[in-house]
């Protein structure tokens, strides 16, 4: 029985833009892409990439059930809810959520106290919603503004314009996205300790096991450490 949907080909879906996991600049690079290339080399497979473009990130998992692609890798946090519908690999990285603010318009927004009365922008289907909903219930923020998953750049433009007061996003991604926006800065990290994994269709244990073994081989050979050092110099091991 073939390991993948197309013999000899591993079809992988990712959402864009999500740097440094997936760059949307035409360079066909990013940590996830480089990792999957290395995994495919270990498994003797060719990599075929699919771009997921939709409003809600969680819809990306539908393609696994429908057998549209073999795997999902997109800086994807392993959560109990997602684990009910997909099979996850062993975690390969761990990160917190980051909070970007407009340091010119809200210079005091560097602590929870400084966020009072502000509107938080998040992407639909993103795990930043867990943080935003908790802060809303606690009265830390005034309300939540939802953006389509591929609308993160619109959220940052609104933050620059003062239409919202903060954007919550996985720390390495939001740090990457604001580095060329001088008005914005990542003011804090929220210790969510999110473990990232590669998702497969439920029941596809053979492919999951093979990918786990390939990632372990990359760790043993030092290639994984090289990728991590290139894209996330300060990232801890999962």
Image (spheres, rainbow, N blue to C red):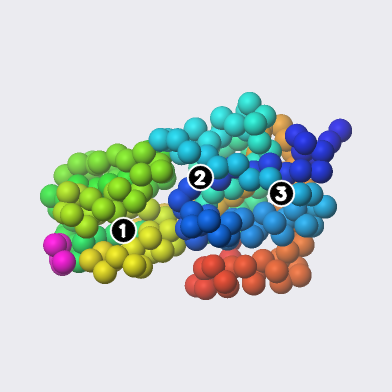
**Structural distance between the alpha carbons of marks 2 and 3:** 16 Å
Is any part of residue 123 visible from this angle?
A: no
Measuring from the top left, give residue 36's x and y in whole percent: 67, 54
* Dots 3, 1 in contact, CB < 8 A: no
The region drawn magenta spans 104-108
The residue at 70%/56% (across/down) is 37
Q: Name the residue nearer the viewer: 15 or 224.
A: 15
User: Residue tagged by mark 1?
Assistant: 99
Q: Residue 107: x, y in percent?
A: 15, 67
The structure residue drawn at horizontal position 68% and vertical position 45%, both measured from the top left corner, is 48
Q: Which residue is mark 2?
A: 15
Q: Nearer the viewer, mark 2 or mark 1?
A: 2
In this view, the mark in front (3 or 1): 3
| Residue at 36% from the left image edge and 39% from the top image edge | 148
Side of 110 where 18 appears, left or right: right
Write the residue at 41% across / 43% down.
150
Q: Does 6 sit left or right of 80 as displayed? A: right
Residue to which mark 3 is pinned: 47
């Amino acid at each position: 029985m073939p390991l993948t949907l197309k013999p000899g080909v591993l079809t992988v879906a990712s959402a864009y833009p999500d740097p440094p996991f997936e760059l949307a600049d035409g360079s066909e690079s990013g940590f996830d892409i480089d990792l999957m290339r290395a995994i495919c080399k270990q498994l003797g497979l060719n990599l075929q990439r699919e771009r997921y473009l939709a409003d809600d990130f969680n819809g990306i998992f539908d393609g696994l059930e429908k057998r549209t692609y073999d795997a999902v890798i997109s800086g994807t946090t392993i959560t109990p809810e997602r684990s009910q519908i997909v099979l996850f690999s062993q975690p390969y990285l761990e990160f917190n959520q980051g909070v970007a603010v407009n340091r010119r318009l809200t210079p005091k927004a560097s602590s929870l106290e400084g966020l009072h009365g502000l509107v938080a922008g998040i992407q639909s289907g993103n795990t930043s919603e867990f943080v935003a909903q908790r802060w809303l219930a606690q009265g830390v923020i005034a309300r939540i503004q939802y953006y389509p998953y591929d609308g993160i750049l619109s959220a940052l433009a609104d933050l620059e314009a003062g239409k919202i007061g903060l954007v919550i996003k996985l720390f390495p991604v939001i740090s990457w996205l604001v580095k060329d926006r001088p008005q914005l800065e990542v003011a804090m990290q929220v210790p969510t300790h999110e473990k990232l994994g590669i998702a497969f269709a439920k029941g596809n244990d053979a492919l999951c096991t093979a990918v786990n073994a390939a990632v372990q081989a990359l760790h043993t050979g030092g290639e994984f450490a090289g990728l991590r050092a290139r894209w996330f110099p300060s990232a801890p091991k999962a």
